Image: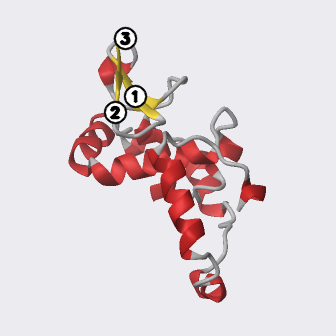
Amino acid sequence: MLQLTEHCHIVRNSEILSGEPIIKGTRTPVRVIVEMWRIGVSPEEIPQRLSHLILSQVFDALSYYLDHQVEMNKYIELNQVADELIPPQFTQTLVKAEIQGTPGQQLLRFAGSITSDDLDLMNEAIKEGCQQVDVDEW
């Protein structure tokens, strides 16, 4: 049985992973997104590695995690793979992965560039159901 959550991209389905929070329309648990993020994969890079996801789903999963950390940490702990079962080449691949993104210092130049009217419009769009918006409208 499908159960909606307060996050537009996150649902629970008692027939998938015993009702663990997943990305709507997939079988991908929120914890997978969180664990990738925790090891240093940027949110923008996650859809490149999990091509069936879009960036708004990734951010919603991280937001869900931050709103439900105690519950989500239990799912992560229950599904933890023992270190001795992880092949060494997998760990080496993660260590060698190039970190991508823009340092926060470089983003400061954009501070204040979004008008309060545009922020209000973005906030309304999010409240109306997390639908994708046309960036050209901003």
Residue 6 in percent (x, y) is at 34, 38
In the picture, measured across the screen, residue 86 lies left or right of residue 90, that is left
| Residue at far right of view | 136
Q: Earlier in the sequence, mark 1 or mark 2?
A: 2
Q: Are marks 1 and 2 in contact (CB under 8 Å)?
A: yes
Picture disc at residue 11: 1
State the quadrant of the N terminus.
Answer: top left
* Amino acid type of the residue tagged 2 in the rendering: Thr
Q: Nearer the viewer, mark 2 or mark 3?
A: 2
| 137 or 28, nearer to the observer | 137
Q: Residue at x 74, y 57 (%)?
A: 137
Q: CA distance from mark 1 to mark 3?
A: 12 Å
Q: Residue at x 69, y 65 (%)?
A: 98
Residue 61 in percent (x, y) is at 45, 44
* Amino acid type of the residue tagged 3 in the rendering: Glu
Residue 54 in percent (x, y) is at 64, 41
* Amino acid type of the residue tagged 1 in the rendering: Val
Q: Secondary structure at mark 2?
A: loop
Q: Secondary structure at mark 1?
A: strand
Whether 13 is drawn above or below 71: the answer is above
Picture disc at residue 5: 2
Tell me if mark 2 has few (under 14), some (14-19) or many (20+) residues whose alpha carbon lies within 10 angstroms of its own.
Answer: few
Tell me if mark 1 has few (under 14), some (14-19) or many (20+) residues whose alpha carbon lies within 10 angstroms of its own.
Answer: many
Whether 39 is drawn above or below 127: the answer is below
Residue ID for mark 3:
15
Q: CA distance from mark 2 to mark 3?
A: 16 Å
In the picture, measured across the screen, residue 80 lies left or right of residue 56, that is left
Q: Secondary structure at mark 3?
A: loop
Q: Note whether residue 113 is visible.
A: yes
